Image: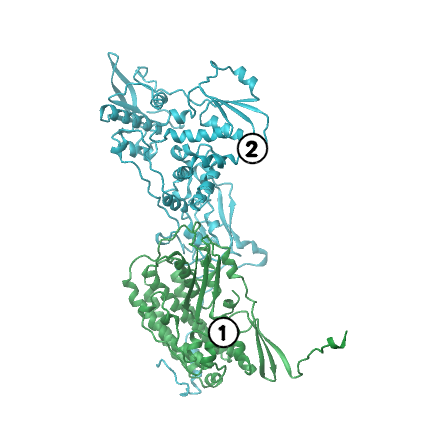
Amino acid sequence: MSKRIDWKALGSILSPLKNVQFLARPAITESLEPRVAAPNYRGFHLNAWDECIGCSTCQKVCDNAAITMVKVPELPNDPVKGVRNLRPAIDYGRCCWCALCVDICPTASISLSREYVHTCFEEEIDSYFMLPREQGMHGKDYGKGWAKSEDADMVDLHRQPMEEVAPEDRVDNFEEIVAGFTRQQAILEASRCVQCGMCHDSCPTHMHAPEYIRAIWQDDVEEAVRQMYRSNPFSHVCGRVCTHRCETACSIGRRGEPIAIRWLKRYAMDAVPHERIREIVAEQKPQFISGRSIGIIGAGPAGLTAAFDLARQGHSVTVYEALAEAGGMTRYGIPYYRLPPEALDNDVDVIVSMGVEIRYNTRVGSDITMEELQRQHDAVLLAIGLQMGRSTRIPGSDHARVFRAVDLLRMAGAGEDFETPRQAIVIGGGNVAMDIARTLARLQKQHYHEVKITVLAMEREADFLADPVEIREAREEGIHIIDARGPREVMVENDELTGLKTWRVKAIFDEQGRFAPT
Amino acid sequence: MRPENYEAKRQPPSNEFELNFGPNHPGIEGNYAFRVKVSGDIVLEGKADAGYLHRGFEKLMENRLWIQNIAITPRICVPDPVPMEVIYCLSVEDLCGQEVPARAQWLRVLQMEMSRFAAYLFYFGGLGSTNGMYTPHYWGMADRDLILDLFEELCGGRVYHIYNIPGGVRRDIPDGWLERVSSTFDYLESRLKDYDDLVFRNQVFIRRTRGIGVLNQQEALELGVTGPNLRACGLPFDVRRDDPYLVYDQLDFDLPTEDAGDNLARALVRRADLFEILRIIRQVIKALPDIDGPIRAPIPNPLAWNVPAGETYQRVESSKGELAWYVVSDGGDKPYRAHVRGPSQTHAVQVLEHLAKGARLEDIAQIMFSLDACPPEVDR
């Protein structure tokens, strides 16, 4: 057969009759049964409700606003765990089956089925609006069509790396370990966010994390700072030592590494000069003075946050602090290698700049009485915190060289004189235990040039309460960690500590979930 | 009323009539009207009347994220959607300075040629219909469906593929798909003889189309005609060869031409083009298994994607002619402007109006279809 046709060489006039031969061919019968589409087909939506967390990212990427998030009351709704009882409902009058919702879904719960057809009578027109579940549009299993695949994932599951001081360089000093993001890193990290707002819901102060992450991505750090100060005046502190529930709830963390929200906060706070932060926060100064006066006892995070919020509302606020400096547990309970005092000073300075007065070295009860406070102020807020340490109450724990965590950290933080032990055991597997162990390790290294610390945790390593990063860093610094062991008795000979007897722990909680180690 | 201001209303001569083709007419691939003024059965003047398919694509794109626009682009030309997807991606990639992996480039070429083949089958069907022959229409649609089956397997969509994405393509090919492409196109090649008997060597068709709607090369160039319509005037111009994009410079193909510039020439050029498409597809099928690597360059989070400020003008060869897009970014997360310069704009408006003058009424539908214009490209 030739590629070119010479139109002058006309074919036979009968040649079109060729189609008559098709009459002799067997007829093709199309079954009335529904046909299953190709394995990659973009049919109707399927949604695995167990995996879906209601983050609404599908709704955001939808071209045609075909997705509405619908509340399903019987499903769990736990902001701390990052689960909402919302599920996507699809309006098939709008959907264009582009499957962007599938490719971007952070949990990979959405997929499309291999089903071709949906049709209905006029009175069933609502059937075009549906809440997809696992079994698909018509309750029949046609199998998954277009689903999330590794090479087509539109979510970036990997964090920007964070530089840290090497273990050997950090173990003999209290310099800050984490270097913080560079501008480039921060913008890239912020660009991973899908703006689901899980972080906002899980944050105890409901910080506007989606907004400030967005601002950081837009390279507008001043706007980021403005967003942070909407609900939290301790952004320098929380940018370093927050327990970051936001990151636990982050929808990207379902399959990958959550957005480094805490480090992004720190980046924005560090990127804006302090004077400029004061100016930005000053925008929130009240237009009216209420004429009311409020006394707050305790210049810790709770007291100062309350002071900031009340000052913003136009009240006159005086904070009474027993110690010489503000910050409370953040100053005396957190080692400097995690939270340098300058960061805390900056936060306090911004709060003071809003017109808050702090009276230091004023202990209520001795320097000023409650009656005086009640007389001077329209309202008094007690924000004294939990200053008493806890004890294991095992035999020998009343020995002078057995310390409680809070006391020890305060002594180290305030620079008080105490004799650094040559060898120490830290009881506990939480972040405070790691703080103690790592603080003592630094002091030992400074005084004796060697680290001899053992951490004894009742939990198994997989269940440690401490942040995995803390555990890793503690090990890097030469701290020995023993898991599933509980303290039994402090051994004392001639008023000298000689050792610690321990139990092997089988279970920490009883069947009712109460603390009852066995 | 002063006498000097009085002007008698001019009534048309009693032998002139106005007639509407469309907006629903089988002579064109969508809703499009063509108003003609006739005297007897001679057309005195034709006026294109677009707008029936206007869905505001270009404006919509300014309000959607860069990624969301991939779902809009194929809708601008239903019979041949792939070039629309590819050119949008080429534009965004150019603005971002993004390199596309080789495998994705070959896959894009394969899709574009498959889509071109399907569009031509659609065209033969339509052209037959406008001459009163409906069998080519049925055959064309049935054979085109085999290509749509391949697309369904590849990307889950039969007509709106939404398979190309800035940076590459969305999925790799399924197992055994290339063999099925190969066997399908072998079958389609075997069918071409039937099409010849039915259409291209059919005395009725040839006599009916020869010498109708003649456009000479000079006029074609002045009017801005491109693609197969220009090649039917004897000028071998094709963006694939003359301004290569993707991997067309590594492929071997010819540009068939005809000299007559009439309806028959336009049909024959496309018929000959099918063989070139088959050549290209076979070259891709042969080369693709040896081209490893990713199918997509890494792209940012689609919800946080700012394309650097700038403007770009990209062009590709669609089945209708030279398709170009002008895209402007102001550095934001949505296009500042996206403009489609489709070949159908020229072919369905200026060329059609030009060819209609003096044509016979019964030839108008045939001329309309022979230009292979796609109205959504005009009403974008």
- The reply to whether discs 2 and 1 touch (Cβ–Cβ < 8 Å) is no
- Say whether mark 1 and mark 2 are on the same chain: no
Q: Residue furthest right?
A: B1
| Residue A422 place in picture, x, y as percent | 24, 21
The chain drawn cyan is chain what? A
Name the residue rendered at 56%, 19% in the picture: A376
Position of B286 relative to A216 (above/below): below
Q: Nearer the viewer, residue A274 or A435?
A: A274
| Residue B63 place in picture, x, y as percent | 51, 55
Name the residue rendered at 57%, 67% in the picture: B52
Name the residue rendered at 26%, 12% in the picture: A495
Few, some or many C-alpha atoms within 10 Å of disc 1 (few <14, some 14-19, many ≥20)?
many
Label 1 resides on the chain identified as B
Q: Is residue A514 visible?
A: no
Label 2 resides on the chain identified as A
| Residue B228 place in picture, x, y as percent | 43, 75
Position of B97 relative to A257 (above/below): below
Q: Element type at marker 2?
A: loop
The chain drawn green is chain what? B
Report, in whole angstroms, how far the alpha carbon at label 2 lies from the one at label 1.
66 Å
Few, some or many C-alpha atoms within 10 Å of disc 2 (few <14, some 14-19, many ≥20)?
some
Nearer to us of marks 2 and 1 is 2
Name the residue rendered at 54%, 23% in the picture: A294
Q: Amino acid at mark 2?
A: Pro
Q: Amino acid at mark 1?
A: His
Q: Element type at marker 1?
A: helix
Return the mark for residue A173. none
Q: Quadrant of residue A180?
A: top left
Q: Is residue B171 visible?
A: yes
Give the residue pinned by disc 1: B347
Give the residue pinned by disc 2: A286
Q: Residue furthest top?
A: A494
